[in-house]
């Protein structure tokens, strides 16, 4: 398994060193790494809409009333994995675990329609297998500088003083500090002079169901000479993304695999567009996947020792939305 992937990461390095543009998709456990050069994207059935690259063709009109139903698991079912996570946190095995669930949904929208009509910084439709509309950048590389924007903490924007509440909530704050610290350490593996440029910046996310505020920070560094131009090696070092895993990484991954009891697959993996010089990549969250003839929405949140079952269960359900308005 490892050697095949290692080969793929090397292939990414070769292309980026030769300044050949390509799009890549890497699943959560880096078991599947796919690379598409520009002329292959069309044939692959991939639809991509990034800020730096888009291959969407036609204007789509939506002439129907959206039907949307979610069937979240019971709180008892959610609690099983939640308790495993909390137990590990109490034992000191982890201090932040990103616990995610898989929820069946029903909608009269096709995955392609969701792709065309949702609004997000990053959108990909993948061969009628999955679609995502992610607000979260993973890393950007611009002129030898690497930047990351960890996003942790969301709140319903209709709550009075929502942004202030989010910034000062002890649990959300602890979670945010942890992820910023983790990603600062991660970036230090591939970059020098790593700094937190912006801390606890509030983003507004508009959705069909409700408006949300999300909290993010900006961290940057200068790529070390041995990683310059090597996108594959950089990804291999940084994955899985800290914001959807937790800390410390190796042990937290074990906890997640035991507590979740389902395969994340491409969900919480990363994909990116290298334009021959610079890179823009995102974490594949806000994710809908087709399994046989059913659709599943995968969502979750960070768990710390301060997390309360009711709140986390509610947050997982809050995130089951499409940003169509």
Image (cartoon, grey):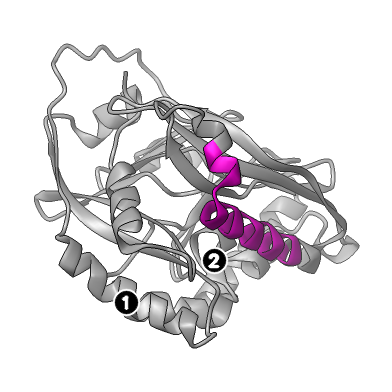
**Residue bearing the label numbered 1:** 83
**Residue bearing the label numbered 2:** 240
The image quadrant where one finds the C terminus is top left
- Foreground mark, 1 or 2? 1
Using the image as rendered, state which of residue 19 and residue 70 is in the foreground.
70
Few, some or many residues within 10 Å of mark 1 (<14, 14–19, 20+): few
Question: Dominant secondary structure of the magenta stretch?
Answer: helix
Residue 209 in view of the camera: yes
Q: Is residue 86 left or right of residue 169?
A: left
Looking at the rendered structure, the secondary structure element under dot 2 is: loop
- How far across and down, in percent of the image, does residue 114 sit? 28, 30
Few, some or many residues within 10 Å of mark 2 (<14, 14–19, 20+): many
- How far across and down, in percent of the image, does residue 11 sit? 62, 62
Identify the magenta region.
165-186
Q: Is residue 182 located in the magenta-colored stretch of the structure?
A: yes
Q: CA distance from mark 1 to mark 2?
A: 23 Å
- How far across and down, in percent of the image, does residue 107 sit? 13, 34
């Amino acid at each position: 398994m490892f050697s095949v992937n290692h080969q793929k990461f090397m292939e990414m390095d070769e292309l980026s060193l030769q300044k050949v543009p390509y799009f890549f998709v890497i699943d959560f456990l880096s078991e599947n790494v796919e690379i598409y050069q520009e002329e292959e994207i069309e044939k692959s059935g991939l639809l991509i809409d990034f800020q730096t690259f888009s291959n969407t063709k036609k204007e789509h009109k939506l002439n129907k009333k959206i039907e949307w139903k979610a069937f979240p698991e019971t709180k008892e079912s959610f609690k099983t994995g939640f308790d495993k996570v909390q137990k590990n946190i109490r034992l000191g095995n982890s201090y932040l675990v990103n616990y995610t669930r898989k929820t069946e949904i029903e909608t009269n929208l096709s995955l392609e329609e969701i792709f065309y009509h949702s609004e997000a910084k990053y959108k990909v439709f993948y061969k009628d297998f999955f679609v995502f509309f992610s607000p979260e950048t993973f890393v950007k590389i611009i002129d030898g500088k690497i930047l990351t924007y960890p996003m942790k903490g969301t709140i319903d924007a209709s709550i009075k003083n929502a942004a202030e509440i989010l910034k000062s909530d002890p649990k959300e704050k602890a979670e945010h500090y942890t992820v910023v610290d983790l990603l600062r350490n991660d970036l230090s593996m591939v970059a020098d002079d790593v700094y937190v440029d912006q801390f606890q910046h509030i983003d507004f996310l508009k959705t069909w169901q409700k408006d949300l505020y999300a909290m993010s920070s900006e961290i940057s560094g200068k790529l070390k000479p041995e990683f310059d131009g090597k996108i594959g090696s950089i990804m291999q070092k940084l994955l899985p993304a800290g914001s959807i895993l937790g800390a410390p990484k190796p042990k937290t991954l074990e906890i997640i695999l035991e507590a979740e009891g389902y395969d994340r697959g491409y969900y919480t993996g990363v994909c990116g567009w290298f334009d021959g010089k610079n890179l823009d990549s995102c974490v594949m969250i806000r994710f809908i996947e087709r399994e046989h003839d059913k659709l599943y929405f995968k969502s979750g949140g960070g768990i710390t020792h301060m997390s309360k079952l009711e709140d986390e269960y509610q947050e997982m359900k809050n995130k089951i939305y499409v940003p169509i308005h």
